[in-house]
C-alpha cells in the first residue's frame, strides 16, 4: 500500500494545480445567498410577469440558454450588441428567429435596483430558462449560479458549435457529446422543440420542389399552407410549429409527432430513423415524466458548460455591453 502514497500525493497536487490554473469559474447552488438573497426570486417574478404579458418569452429563454451555453460557455456572450470591436452573435445565421432579448434588460433592471453590479447576465439567462421551463409545464430544475459574463463575443465560432437544421444525427450527437451530453440527453434536449416556432427558411427545403417523403402528407399540407413560397421573404414572419396540439407546453408530444412523421426540422425527424436515438424517442414518447427527468439532467449539464473564471469574466452593468473601466 505504501507504494501508492506518492502517487496519490501526486494526484492531489495535480488536481490542486488543475483547480487553480484551468481558469474554470466556480458555480454553486445559491451563490447569491449572501450578496443578493432575493436574486432568484426577483428573476422568477420577472419571468412570471413577462410570461403573463407575452407567453413566448418563456419559450425564448430556453433557446437562449442553448445558444449561449453551447458556444464555448454560459457567459451571456449572445446578449452583446454590435459596437466598436464587437460583432454581435445575434447576427449569426444560426441565431435566426431568436427573440425577446429586450426583456432581459427588464430582468437586469429589477436586479440592479436591489443589488447593483452583483448578478451576472449569464445567470439571468440560466435562471430565466429554468423558470421559463416551469411556466411551460416542464420540470423544476435546481440550477447553480455564479457564472461570469464574457468580455467579448464568439460570433465567428457559432457555426462550429450550434448545428444546422439539416445536419446529420451523427454530427449533432458529436456536438452535444463535446459538452458532456450523451445520446439520451441529446434526444431529451431536442424535446424543447415541443414549444415555439420555426421560420419557413428552415423548412422549405423539405417542401419544394418536391415534398420530403418522410413527411406525413397532412402535416406537409399544413406546412405548405404556412410556407407557401419556396424562397421565403427573410423579413416575413412566416413560420410553422412542431406541436400543434400543445404548442405552449413542454411535453413529450414532440416525440409522438416525430414517430408519426410530423417532425418539423430534418434534425428532429432523423431522431426516429437513427438506431442510436430511436429507442430513446420511443421511451420519451411513452412516458412524459421520464422525458422531464432526462430533460432536467441534460439542461443542467448544458447550463454548467465551461463557466468563465472571475479573472476572465465580469458582471456586466448592462447585459448588452461589456463594462468599460
Ligand atoms: C441539433 C440541435 C438543434 C438545432 C439544429 C436547432 C434548430 C432550431 C431552429 C432552426 C429553430 C427555429 C428558429 C426559427 O426559425 O425561428 C429552433 C427553435 C427553437 N429551438 Fe432549437 N435547435 C436545436 C436544439 C435545441 C435545443 C438543445 C434547445 C433547448 C434545449 C432548443 C430550443 C429551441 C426553442 C425553444 C425554439 C423555439 C424558439 C422560439 O419559438 O422563439 N433547440 N431550433
Ligand atoms: C442545409 O440547409 C442549408 C440552408 O439552410 C443549405 O444551404 C444546405 O445546402 C443544406 N445542406 C444539406 C446537406 O442539405
Image: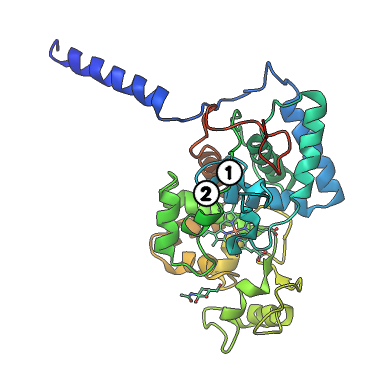
- Please give the residue where the numbered disc 1 appears in the rendered image: 152
Locate the N terminus by quadrant: top left
Extreme top residue here?
2
> Which structural element holds mark 2?
loop
Q: Position of residue 245 (x, y in %)?
A: 72, 64
Viewer-closest of 5 and 315: 315
Viewer-closest of 38 and 134: 38
Locate the C terminus by quadrant: top right
> Which structural element holds mark 1?
loop
State if disc 2 and disc 1 touch (CB < 8 Å). no
Vertical position of residue 95 compared to residue 230: above or below: above
Q: Residue at x 66, y 81 (%)?
A: 218
The color scheme shown is rainbow
Q: Position of residue 15 (x, y in %)?
A: 33, 22
Callout 2: few (<14), some (14-19), or many (20+) C-alpha neighbours within 10 Å?
Answer: many
Q: Position of residue 27 (x, y in %)?
A: 55, 27
Vertical position of residue 244 compared to residue 5: above or below: below
Q: Position of residue 178 (x, y in %)?
A: 41, 48
Q: Residue at x 78, y 38 (%)?
A: 107
- Please give the residue where the numbered disc 2 appears in the rendered image: 71
Can residue 194 be seen by looking at this rendering?
A: yes
Extreme right residue here?
53
Amino acid at each position: 500500500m505504501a507504494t501508492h502514497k506518492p502517487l496519490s500525493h501526486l494526484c492531489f497536487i495535480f488536481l490542486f494545480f488543475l483547480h487553480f490554473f484551468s481558469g474554470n469559474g466556480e458555480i454553486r447552488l445559491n451563490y447569491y445567498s449572501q450578496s443578493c438573497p432575493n436574486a432568484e426570486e426577483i428573476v422568477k417574478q420577472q419571468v412570471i410577469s413577462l410570461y403573463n404579458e407575452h407567453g413566448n418569452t418563456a419559450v425564448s429563454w430556453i433557446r437562449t440558454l442553448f445558444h449561449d451555453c453551447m458556444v464555448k460557455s454560459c457567459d451571456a456572450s449572445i446578449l452583446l450588441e454590435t459596437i466598436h470591436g464587437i460583432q454581435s452573435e445575434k447576427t449569426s445565421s444560426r441565431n435566426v428567429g431568436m427573440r425577446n432579448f429586450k426583456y432581459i434588460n427588464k430582468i437586469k433592471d429589477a436586479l440592479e435596483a436591489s443589488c447593483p453590479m452583483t448578478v451576472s447576465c449569464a445567470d439571468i439567462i440560466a435562471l430565466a430558462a429554468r423558470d421559463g421551463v416551469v411556466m411551460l409545464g416542464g420540470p423544476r430544475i435546481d440550477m447553480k449560479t455564479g457564472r461570469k459574463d464574457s468580455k467579448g463575443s464568439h460570433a465567428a465560432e457559432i457555426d462550429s458549435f450550434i448545428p444546422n437544421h439539416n445536419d446529420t444525427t451523427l454530427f449533432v450527437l458529436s456536438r452535444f457529446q463535446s459538452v458532456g451530453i450523451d445520446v439520451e440527453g441529446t434526444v431529451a434536449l431536442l424535446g424543447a422543440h415541443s414549444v415555439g416556432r420555426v421560420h419557413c427558411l428552415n423548412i422549405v427545403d423539405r417542401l419544394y420542389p418536391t415534398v420530403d417523403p418522410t413527411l406525413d402528407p397532412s402535416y406537409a399540407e399544413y406546412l405548405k399552407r404556412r410556407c407557401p413560397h419556396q424562397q421565403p421573404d427573410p423579413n416575413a414572419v412566416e413560420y410553422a410549429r412542431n406541436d400543434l396540439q400543445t404548442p405552449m407546453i413542454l411535453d413529450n408530444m414532440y416525440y409522438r409527432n416525430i414517430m408519426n412523421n410530423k417532425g418539423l426540422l430534418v434534425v428532429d425527424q432523423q431522431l426516429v430513423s437513427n438506431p442510436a436515438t430511436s429507442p430513446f424517442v420511443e421511451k420519451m414518447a411513452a412516458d412524459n415524466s421520464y422525458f422531464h427527468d432526462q430533460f432536467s439532467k441534460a439542461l443542467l449539464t448544458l447550463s454548467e458548460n465551461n463557466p468563465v473564471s472571475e479573472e476572465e469574466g465580469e458582471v456586466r452593468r448592462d447585459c448588452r455591453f461589456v463594462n468599460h473601466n
